[in-house]
Amino acid sequence: MRKYLLLLILCLTVVIADAQQFMLNGRITGDKGEPIGFTSVYIRNSTYGTTANELGQYQFKLAPGNYNIVYRFVGYREKVVPVSITDHDERLNVQLENEVFSRDDTATYNRKTDRGMAIMREVMANRERHMNEFKSYTCQVYIKGVQRLTKAPKSLMSSPVIKQLDLDSLGRGILYQSESLSEFNLQRPNKFKEITIAAKSTGGSPAFNYNKASDLQLNIYQNIFYIDGLRSRGFVSPVADNAFKYYRFRLAGTTVSNNRTIHKIAILPKSKRSSTFRGFLYIVDGDWRVYSADLYLTEENDNINLIDTLSISQQYIPVKDSVWLPASIQYDYKGSVLGFKFAGYYVGIYNNYKIDQTFPDGFFNGEVLKVDTAANTKPSSYWNAIRPVPLTPQEMRDYRKKDSLFALQHSDPYLDSVQLENNKFSLPSYTIFGYEAKNRRTKESFYVAPLYQSIYYNTVEGWGIDAQVKYTKKFDDLRSFSISPEFKYGFSSKLASPMIHSEYLFDQWHRGRVFTNFGADVMDLSNVGTRSLWFNTLSSLLFENNYVKYYRNQYGNIGYERELANGILWSSSVEYSNRRQLYNTSYQHIFNPKNKEYTSNNPLAPPGTPADDRSFLFPEHQAFTFKTSLEFTFGQRYITRPDGRTFVPSRYPKIVLNYRKGIDGVFGSDVNYDFVSINISQDHIPIGLTGYSSFRISAGDFLNRRNLYFMDYNHFSGNQGLTFDPTDLASFHFLPFYQFSSNDAFLEAHYQHNFAGAFFSRIPFMRKLKLEEIIGANFLTEKNNMNYSEFYVGIQRLFFRVDYGVSFTGDKKYIQGFRIFYGIR
């Protein structure tokens, strides 16, 4: 018995010893002792490794055994050092030698005969082979991001600012740090799923954010790739199949590293501003694949946003003899805003590749990112144990301070004091933004709409008040309930309009909700809306343009919405209404434009009809209406976080099927019709180097039109003012609000293309403005109306946009002119 017990103890000892891991760390320097930051460090013949920090310090854990450690950095000779891990941590400092790339000739560069051109032809010929070396893989990805303030205007560096941002006397300090650890799964050609195991961040929002593994999936073998946040147009890869149209290449030198011949190729764009990279590619001779890349973009040459320069460094390693994949990728950036200069980086480390994995059915279900419920709660001890890139002293100090600050700011006394301060009433704030009070413990909030939205004027009601409040209650399981009482009163019409709107979100994961609304209101005759109370007030009082036409509606409705499956959203509702015609009762104005008068509240009244017209549009009647729709979002993608689900724009069109029925005889209903329509749309379709396009096509018809009234017609999103809303692609620039409303078959189409600066970026005096060029067309055809069309061109910068367009009814010019948008809808 004792013999077997000793054998068992011995086996357990061996297992425990084998399971133990010890730290290998050290510092990487050059031949002059300078640190070589962000050097790739990995175990030869494996896919496990790390990257040094900016001070050249590295660390990672290894089980006892013998290893060959590879050290690689662009511009330095690759070094392989054998190391033995026994029963303790090991420190291994490494000095790298400058890589010497020799050329066979020293002749003047000739673009036709330079060997770099021939080498790149071989790379391009093998591009497809390298892209298709694997069908799928899974790996572990660690991402670290840091943004620093490197210089700040002295005039703005007061003591409170320096203290708050933890800056030194020169205005330097860390503004933002982030780390994440994920499992990344990819299946060619375009399916991926990322599971975030741990995530940590401190500081404010950075200039742009790449803290997900999918953000750093830069495949240099693709013809065109996009870098989110920098600009809407793509960049031509230097190994694209048409790269010779945009680049010349020069052999900068050749070296032999670990029995591989490596060519250093200089990337020379043919045009200074042609959506191209600059820098160097390192190519493996014979295999004609990318060994590493050292590329950069600049604001001056590439018209990128937010930053001045972006450097991209990527290291590839052999996962198998015939498969090479990135071991690391790094983005370094610099920029300046209003005298503040900043710099930062994101580095991604890829470990433990498993090639040609077989994923279970349904694994790629549209969920592109899932954040574990405990991802953001990992303690410092966890990060100290798994962090592959050691922190610098400054980063450690920043974490300690901001972690302590975070703990303070999330303590109950602090949160209670913040809540008390935020819940104080401020008249200036209420006037513009409204008033909101929250109770974080009960997860309740109370909101009052801003004062400027509460006072309005129109010719039907005269001056009026619109008092709106909203109560919201959230539950721990992500359910929520809201109720919004509203009261409107028109002093001229003497119409009181009490209403209650409520919604119960019972399934946040699948957009499941129930809603109900009831009360009385003075409503727009167009069910797609025309102008808000606020804009209609301004256009009426300042220009005597009472564009919106109103009717009285006493109503009650109830509806239901939920996803039936990923990408299939079903909604349905029923409504009962009592509807009657209204007339103008007030004719006030602030200015009286010459020869300008208010128009009738009957949208079908002929031009010249006086404002006090009481012509007949429809009788008072009752309507019982049923609506349902199915929305198909093909290839719908989404992100799942502990606080809910957010949707990612699909790469495919969306189709919406609508059915609306007026049911005769139910509760005295007078309507009897059936309306069907289909909408097909897609936003932001990337068109390579020339920006992106969007389109929407809608068609419909009344299958039965035995009895319906004007508000039951199919209405279109028209526009009759100087401003317009470009966020709604289905809106027209010049179409009258009600003139084309249809009770018959129709077809409408909208197309818009944003060149995203493709032309303006080539004009020296306009380049810095970063304007985006836009063209578009809208079309409408109906059975009982002439065809309507409009064409426009525009320029856009951030939320400001100016368009000039011309419209036609049939073949006759209708309206032309400018339309503007300045962020307010």
Image (cartoon, grey):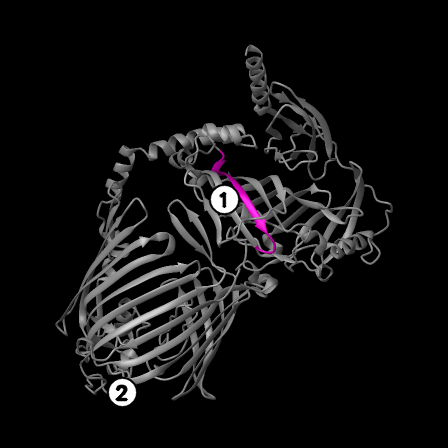
Residue 691 figure quarter: bottom right
- Nearer the observer, disc 2 or disc 1? 1
Q: Secondary structure at mark 1?
A: strand
Q: Secondary structure at mark 2?
A: loop
**Is 277 within the magenta?**
no
Tell me where the magenta segment starts and ends, as one range.
170-190
Is 109 placed above or below 824 here? above
Of 627 and 231, which appears nearest the observer? 627
Q: Nearer the viewer, residue 745 or 155?
A: 745
Residue 13 can be seen, yes or no: yes
Q: CA distance from mark 2 to mark 1?
A: 61 Å
Q: Main secondary structure of the magenta part?
A: strand
Specify the farthest residue to the top.
2
Q: Which residue is mark 1?
A: 195
Query: In the rendered structure, which amino acid carries the disc numbered 1?
Result: Ile
Q: Decide if residue 716 is on the left or right side of residue 710.
A: right
* Quadrant of residue 465 within the rendered picture: bottom left
In this figure, which residue is indicated by the disc labeled 2? 605
